[in-house]
Amino acid sequence: MGVTKKPASKGQQGKAFKVTLTIMETIDTIRARVKRLRLEFADAKERTQRAQQEENYGLMDLRRKGKTMLDETEDAKDTYRNAVDELWTEYEPKFEAKLLRLADAFLDEGWTVGQIEDFSDEEYALTLPLLRDGHHAGIRITLLESLATDDSLEGIAFGVDLDADCGHVIGGMTPFNYTSELWIPLNSTHAIAERWAYIMHSDDYEAEHVLAEHFKTCESLSLKGEED
């Protein structure tokens, strides 16, 4: 015997309709939320890509600027070196003239004087070798470079060193050493000439006296050591 289904009442039909509507609204809400999330994700992805591109462009720009600055620095260093080369061409004969004057002073005091030695392959310098009583010494005049000394392009300076026995520096003269006025700009021709005048017009016999006193002191100490 079969089962006879009773038709749904109006109340039951209304409840079923409401449930169906609720489910459909829920599905639409979920779809809208998913769509919104997809849009938000796409927008976030686009912003991220744009930011990455801007960062890459920024890095490229920084690299470009860095290379430009490096090239400009190297160009400035080349300009500096060329200017120093030109200055050395002008001042090398002046260095030699000063050393010849010093040679006369040392000869007057009984020293043996050697030929002037050129060290310009290593630095801008000339040296006058000296000998007396078995003691070796030398006077060295150098065109000092700020680029070689402290990696700056401030300029140049002049220095005189008195070397004794194996190159030990026992005295010398570098006008305005350890001051802010040490380096003279390469474009200040007059200032460079004025600075050189300190060297050129210094007392030639003073250098001889310093070296002579040094060797006397060394000999006295040596004799005292033998007596002890």
Image (spheres, rainbow, N blue to C red):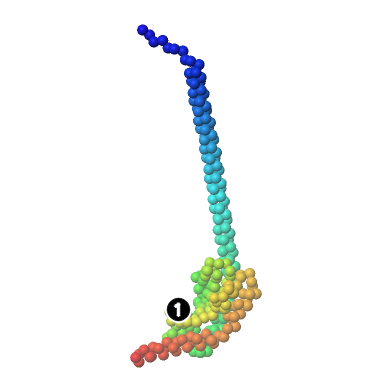
Q: Residue at the spot x=42%, y=87% of the render?
A: 218
User: Is residue 113 positioned above or below 64 on the image?
Assistant: below
Q: Residue at x 42, y 12 (%)?
A: 5
Q: Which of the two residues, 89 or 172, is positioned nearer the viewer here?
A: 172
Quadrant assignment, res 70: bottom right
SS under mark 1: loop
Q: Nearer the viewer, residue 137 or 41?
A: 41
Q: Position of residue 144 (x, y in %)?
A: 54, 73
The answer to whether residue 30 is visible is yes
Which image quadrant for residue 199? bottom right
Residue 86 lies, with reference to residue 40, above or below; the image says below
Furthest-bottom residue in this view: 227
Residue under label 1, please give it: 167
The amino acid beneath tag 1 is: Gly
Q: Is the residue 37 above or below the residue 223 in the image?
A: above
Query: Residue 228's spot in the image, x, y percent?
Result: 34, 91
List x then y, in percent, for residue 11: 50, 18
The residue positioned 55% from the left and 67% from the top of the image is: 152
Mark 1 crowd level (few <14, some 14–19, many ≥20, 10 Å Cα):
few
Q: Residue 6, located in which quarter of the rendered image?
A: top left
Position of 113 compared to 155: left or right? left
Q: Quadrant of the N terminus?
A: top left
